[in-house]
Image (cartoon, rainbow, N blue to C red):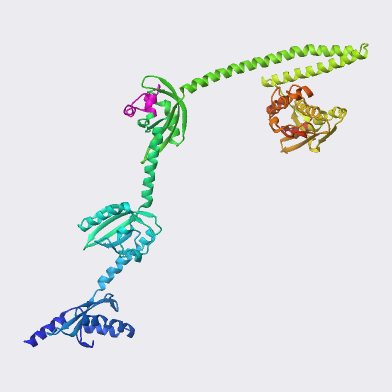
Amino acid sequence: MREKESDLLEGIIDAIPDPIVVKNLEFKILRCNPAGYTLLGEIQKIQRNNREKIFNDEVSEKAVKTEKMQKTLKPVKVQDSYYQKVATPILSSDGEVTHIVEQYKNITEVIEKQKELDVYFSSSLDLLCIANMEGRFLRLNPEWEKVLGYTTEELKDQDILDFLHREDILLTYEAIKELGNDQEVKGFVNRYRRKDGTYRWLEWRAKPVNRKIYAVARDITEQEEGKRKLEVSEEKYKTLVEQSTEMLYLHDLKGNILDVNKTTCNEMGYKREELLTLNILDLHPYKGDPKYFEHMWENWSKNQIIEFTTEHKTQKKKIMDVEIRARKISFGGKEYIMALARDVTETRKIQDTLIQAKRKAESANIAKTRFLANMSHEIRTPMNGIQGFLQLLEDTPLDEEQRDYLGHIENSSTNLLSIINDILDLSKIESGEVYFDRHPINLKETIENIAIPFEYRAISKGLGYEVNITKELSQEVYGDTTKLMQIATNLITNAIKFTAEGKVFVKAKIEEEDETHLTLLFSVKDSGIGLRKSEIGKVFLPFNQADDTNTRKYGGTGLGLAIVKELLDVMGGNISIESTYGLGSTFSLRVPLEKVPFKELEKR
C-alpha cells in the first residue's frame, strides 16, 4: 500500500511542470523531477559564481529553522528565464523536518510584464503612482521628482496627506474613502507641497484594483494660476467698468448691444434690460441709416481704434454730444466692439463760446494792426516833413544856443521816426503783409556792406570792433538784402548800445551746406550788460526789455528783437542767446538760403 502511495507521489512530482528538487538536511540533492533535471542541466552551463548564487541555500535554511514555506524575494535568472525559488520543509510524524523540497516557479512572463510596467512608469510625462488603501505611496515614477523635487525613495511609504496643502486634506481624505468603496475618482484637483515649500496643482484620475490605488496625475499649476489671474482680472474689469465715469457699451458686429455699465444707464435714462434689447443705431438720431457707420466697420475690421464725435438720443429724446472711442476685441472665439462714450455737450458749448471769443479777439487784433499801420503812415509823412525842414533850418544863420536846440530836435525826430518804422514793420508782420524780395545776392559782399559801416559808430563810443567773415561765404544765394540788413542791423545796434566798454565782435560763416542749400550762421558778441537767465525769454516779446530801467537809460521800444524773431520765423530761421549777466551776450541767428544754380550763374 505504501509502495503504491509512494509511486503515486513520485508520479505527481514528475508530472509537475515546475522544476522540483528534494534535498536532505545537509542540502544535498536526493531527487529531481524531469523538469528539475533539465533546470540543473541548464545551471551546469552557467559560470561557477552564478551557479553558487542560484544554488544558494539561504531560503532552504530559513525554511528548516521556521518549519514554514519560504520564498526568494529576488527572482533567480537561469539563461533567459526567471524563477522564484520556493522552499517547503517536509515534517515527520514527530513534527521534525526531515527533507526540503525546492520548487522553481517560472515567473518569466511576470518579469517581462514588470519590465514593461517599469518602462511605462519611467517614460510617462504624467505622474504615475500606486498607493495602498491607507493612502501611502507604494510606487512612483521619476516624473514626481521633476514636479515636487522629492526623489521617489523619499516619497515611497510616505502618507499622501502629509504632502497636501492643509485646505485640501479633508477633500483628499474623502476621495481616498471613495476609492476604498471601489468608486473611481476623476478630475479631482488638489495641491502638493514641493521640497522648496511652494505648492503645485495636480489633477487626478484614480481607480482601485485589488485593494490598491492606481492613479495618474497631471501638473496643472500654470492653468490654475492662469484661471485665478483671469478671475482676478475679470473682477477688476467688472469693478473698473462699473466705477467708470464714462459710458461703456459692448455690442456685436451688427450693433446689437450686449452689455452696458451703470453710467450708461444713468446718462441715457434707460434701464439695463431696456438697453440690451436695442441696437447701437437706436441711440443715434440717424437711426435707419447704417451707411453712417460703414467706414467705422471697415476700420474695426483692421483692429484699429476708432475715435469720433456724434450724438446720442436719451430716453427722454434729449440730444447729447458724445465722444466715442471704440475698437474690436476677441473673446471666446467671437468678435465684439467695445466702446467708451463721454458726454461732451457742455464742453462743446464752452468750445463754441471760446471759438467765438477767439474770432472776436482776432478781429480786434486785425483792427488794431490796421490802425497801427494807418497811424504809422499818417505820422511818418509829417515826420519826414519835419526832418526836411530841420535840415533846411541848419543852413540858416543860427547862434550857438539855437544850433544846440536844433541838434536835440533832430535827434528826437530821428528816434521818433525809428519807433514809427518799428511799429509799422511789426504791424505788417502780424497782419501777414510781409513780402520778401527774393533775388540773387553775393552773401559775403552783402554781410560786409551791413557790418563794416558800424565800425565808426563803435569806435566813436570807445569800443573795439571786429568783423570776421569766412571766405566760403563768397557765393551767390537767393535772399532779401533789405530783410537781412534789418535783422543784422538790429543785432549790431543793440550790441553797441548796451556795451559801455570792451569790444563788439561780428562773425559770419556757413554752418551746413549741400549742393542746393546752405545755412548762414551770423553771430554778434559783446561785452555789455548781459542778461539774467530769467530775462532771456523776455527780450523777444514786443514792447518789452529785459529790465525796465534799460528803456530809460538806453532808450528804444523793445520792438527790435521781436521784429528779428518774427522775420526769422517767416524765413525758416531761428535765433539763440548765450549770456552772462554783467559780462556780455552772444546773439546767434541761423538762416537757411537757397544757392543760385551754376547754370544761371553761367548765363549771367
To which quarter of the image does residue 580 belong? top right
Q: In which quarter of the image is the N terminus?
A: bottom left
Q: Using the image, determine if residue 397 lies above or below residue 181.
A: above
Name the side, left or right, on which 133 lies relative to 164: left
Find residue 462 and report its image quarter: top right
- Which segment is the magenta one? 263-286
Residue at the image point whose x is 37% and y is 30% from the top: 262
Apparent side of residue 153 relative to residue 411 in the rendered image (left or right): left
- Is residue 476 covered in magenta? no
Residue 555 seen in the figure: no
Q: Is residue 265 left or right of residue 552?
A: left
Residue 271 lies in the magenta stretch: yes
Q: Position of residue 579 (x, y in %)?
A: 74, 34
Q: Where is residue 263 in the image (x, y as percent from the top left)?
A: 39, 28
Q: Considering only vertical position in the picture, is 472 above or below 547?
A: below
| 62 is higher (above) or lower (below) than 434 | below
Of residues 9 and 28, the one drawn nearer to the viewer in this rendering: 28
Q: In percent of the image, x 58 and y 19: which residue is there?
A: 358
Q: Position of residue 288 (x, y in %)?
A: 37, 23
Which percent across, then down, holds residue 468? Answer: 82, 36
- In depth, the one of 224 and 67 nearer the eye is 67
In this view, 543 is above or below 55: above
* Residue at x-position 87% and y-position 14%: 405
